[in-house]
Image (spheres, rainbow, N blue to C red):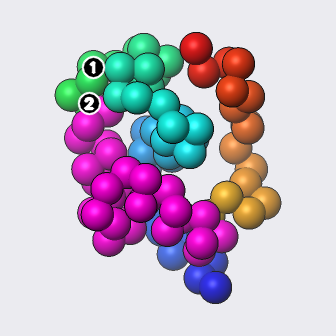
Amino acid sequence: MTSNTNFKFNNMEKEVIEFLKFGCTNPEIAKKLNVSTHTVKYHISSIIRKTNAVNRINAVFILGMNGYFDNCEQEILQPQELH
């Protein structure tokens, strides 16, 4: 299994990934991060490209399969905090 260090994400991409793993929509992510939906779409596209995924769900799956979420140092968001 590949180490999560093989994925190079900027801080905003890392934040977006945290919301993607809970299945949040672009508007939900934009609201939580206080950015536009266009900005969210931009970062999701970058995440998809960097993971060689076909869509956002596939990107989260690839990250999970490659250990990205193992021993994650970021604060874990609880589902009730997302809305």
Q: Callout 1: helix, strand or loop? A: loop
One can see residue 57 in this view: yes
x, y percent for residue 80? 70, 19
Residue 57 belongs to the span the image colors magenta: yes
Are the residues at dot 2 and dot 1 in contact (C-beta closer than 8 Å)? Answer: yes
Q: Callout 2: helix, strand or loop? A: helix
Q: Height in image: 27 above or below 50? A: above
At x 21%, y 28%, the residue is 38
Q: Height in image: 48 above or below 20? A: below
| Quarter that holds the C terminus | top right
- Residue nearer the viewer, 62 or 43: 62
Residue at the extreme bottom of the image, as rendered: 1
- In the rendered structure, the answer to whether residue 41 lies left or right of residue 6 reads left
x, y percent for residue 1? 64, 85
At x 65%, y 70%, the residue is 67
Residue linked to disc 1: 36
x, y percent for residue 7? 48, 68
Magenta-colored span? 40-67
Q: Amino acid at mark 1?
A: Ser
Residue linked to disc 2: 39
x, y percent for residue 31? 42, 14
Q: Amino acid at mark 2?
A: Thr
At x 52%, y 62%, the residue is 61
